[in-house]
Image: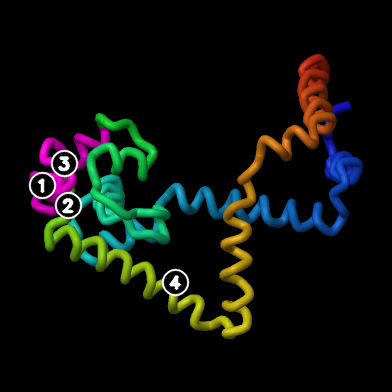
Amino acid sequence: MPLSTKTEINALLQRAGVTAETTAAVMDIDGMLQHWRRRAMKRELGNRALIDLKIDIDLAQLDVLSAIAGPAPEFGDSQGETMVGTVADRLAIDPSRASRLVSEMVDRGFARRAVSQADARRTIIELTAQGEAVVDAVRAYKYLILGDFLGTWSPEDIAAFVPLLKRFSRWTDGIDAVTDRHGPEIDQLVEAIAMAGKVPEEV
């Protein structure tokens, strides 16, 4: 039977061992995440930062500068030298696109190529003073906006929120184990889609 109502979805989750309270939270969080995703895709804050700071580059170029800088909170372990392949990995883009964007930043004076200290045959990418200034300014701009917002929160709320957000950010880790555990429920969803396709449309 197609899961055509919220009640049927609730029943499916209940059979999977998810409590009603958790189900309500899941639905609220999913709605907020979808809204957040749509806003994030527009890159509102990044666009505003480039405009307000009068930086004549686009967001893709800014991403490359950030990837060259490799700040740990954004890219995790960012130790070691940065190469074009490193930029491609950090941004999850094709190496040829990363190479083109890096070349644009080098040509415009935001980055430079240098010789690796570990292997003279290897070319690495570094930010110039101008590139570092751009990355630092955009980061500071974002911190100002977020800091102003969080400044209205109590210290207790912030102390509770940050570790919980870090914990929540890993919610898709181990997804294979979760899907294995809920194989019957996923099979039911597959069946619901198949059955819906057999229902004739009303004219």
Image marks 3 and 4: residues in contact by CB distance under 8 Å:
no
Q: Nearer the viewer, mark 1 or mark 3?
A: 3
Residue 79 vertical position relative to residue 185 in the rendered view, above or below? below
Q: Nearer the viewer, mark 1 or mark 4?
A: 1
Q: Which residue is mark 3?
A: 119
Q: Which mark is residue 146?
A: 4
Gap in angstroms between the C-alphas marked 1 and 4: 35 Å
Q: Amino acid at mark 1?
A: Ala
The CA span between labels 2 and 1 is 7 Å
Which callout, 3 or 4, points at the residue further toward the start of the chain? 3
Q: Check disc 2 and report the residue beneath it.
A: 126
Q: Is residue 203 visible?
A: no
Q: Nearer the viewer, residue 102 or 174?
A: 174
Q: Measuring 17% from the left and 52% from the top, which residue is drawn there?
A: 126
Which range of residues does the magenta coloring cover? 97-122
> Would you say the residues marked 2 and 1 are in contact, meaning their CB atoms lie under 8 Å apart?
yes
